[in-house]
Image (cartoon, rainbow, N blue to C red):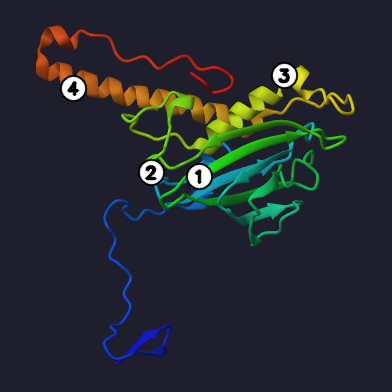
């Protein structure tokens, strides 16, 4: 008996059966999105395109950059225990050509990837795909270095273990097991690291004395995504509370809606 793969016969040993890919378990229904349509509505760079980021998930995230007046997007380093894949869907006057695809190293630099970030015609549309840990810990870090001497100024490490893997801890960002939408830890870690770095005392290099410029967090949109994450989860809880109260009786239905916790620049509670 032979099995075929891409038209080629595979000889099977006595007692062997043809290999089969397991059927989908139904945990993640197939979804599709058009990257060009999706990117129009981005609220954050590195925004996940699909609602799946649990154990073993493949998480494509979108980013779109274009030239800005002062050309200042900043630069940092990202560390992930699992490598990522980048794919460029379109670019102009950028360091990465349209159609480029590559795997990042665990520690990799991040910037606008534009040759001239002040050129209004420069742009790049890219996806960065992360692979979530199957069954173990996953750690990440965002690192800022002095632009003059490369001395490390901030290393913000955080636990990015998927929410459905044992050892996951949502407490750093004020999350919990009843969150309808899990936090995408990379965005929380990025905005938290940038908030720490942007203090002038931290940006002043202890080695060479250079005062590094503030990181333009607003261009990256991370804080907006983290803030909306809190509001969306609070809205879900308000809906559930209202539904429960409507079934319990008129008196309970008069209770006020859930209010999301205060949000700081660092995305903390």
Helix, strand or loop at mark 1 = loop
Asked if the residue under mark 1 is in contact with the one under mark 2, i.e. CB atoms within 8 Å, the reply is: yes
- Labels 1 and 4: the sequence-earlier one: 1
Q: Quadrant of residue 212?
A: top right
Q: Which mark is residue 243?
A: 4
* Residue 9 visible somewhere in the drawing: yes
Q: CA distance from mark 1 to mark 3?
A: 28 Å
Image x and y of residue 166, in percent:
37, 41
Helix, strand or loop at mark 4 = helix
Quadrant of the rendering where the N terminus is positioned: bottom left
Q: Badge 1: few (under 14), some or many (20 or more) residues near its Cα, within 10 Å?
A: some
Helix, strand or loop at mark 3 = loop
Q: Which mark is residue 138?
A: 1
* Nearer to me, 32 or 75: 75
Instruction: Indicate which label's residue lies in the foreground, 2 or 4.
Output: 2
Residue at 28 percent of width and 83 percent of height = 17
Q: Quadrant of residue 22?
A: bottom left
Image x and y of residue 231, in percent:
41, 23
Instruction: Indicate which label's residue lies in the foreground, 4 or 3.
Output: 3
* Vertical side of 38 occupied by 220: above or below: above
Asked if the residue under mark 3 is in contact with the one under mark 4, i.e. CB atoms within 8 Å, the reply is: no
Asked if the residue under mark 3 is in contact with the one under mark 2, i.e. CB atoms within 8 Å, the reply is: no
Q: CA distance from mark 2 to mark 3?
A: 35 Å
Q: Which residue is mark 2?
A: 165
Q: Badge 3: few (under 14), some or many (20 or more) residues near its Cα, within 10 Å?
A: few
- Labels 2 and 1: the sequence-earlier one: 1
Image x and y of residue 63, in percent:
59, 44
Q: Which residue is mark 3?
A: 199
């Amino acid at each position: 008996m032979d099995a075929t793969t891409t038209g080629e016969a595979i000889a099977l040993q006595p007692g062997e059966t043809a290999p089969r890919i397991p059927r989908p378990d139904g945990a993640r229904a197939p979804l599709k999105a058009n990257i060009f349509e999706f990117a129009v509505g981005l609220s954050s760079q590195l925004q996940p395109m699909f609602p799946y980021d649990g154990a073993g998930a493949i998480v494509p995230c979108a980013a779109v950059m274009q030239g800005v007046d002062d050309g200042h997007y900043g630069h940092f380093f990202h560390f992930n225990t699992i490598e990522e894949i980048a794919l460029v869907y379109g670019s102009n006057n950028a360091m990465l050509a349209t159609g480029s695809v590559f795997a990042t190293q665990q520690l990799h630099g991040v910037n606008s990837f534009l040759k001239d970030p002040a050129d209004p015609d420069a742009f790049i549309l890219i996806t960065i795909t992360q692979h979530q840990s199957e069954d173990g810990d996953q750690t990440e870090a965002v690192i800022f270095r002095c632009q003059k001497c490369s001395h490390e100024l901030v290393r913000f490490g955080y636990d990015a273990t998927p929410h459905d893997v044992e050892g996951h801890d949502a407490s750093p960002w004020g999350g919990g097991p009843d969150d309808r939408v899990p936090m995408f830890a990379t965005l929380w870690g990025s905005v938290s690291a940038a908030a720490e770095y942007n203090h002038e005392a931290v940006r002043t290099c202890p080695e060479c004395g250079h005062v590094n410029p503030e990181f333009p967090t607003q261009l990256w949109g991370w804080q907006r995504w983290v803030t909306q994450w809190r509001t969306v989860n609070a809205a879900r809880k308000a809906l559930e509370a209202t539904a429960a109260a409507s079934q319990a009786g008129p008196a309970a239905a008069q209770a006020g809606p859930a209010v999301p916790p205060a949000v700081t620049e660092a995305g903390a509670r």
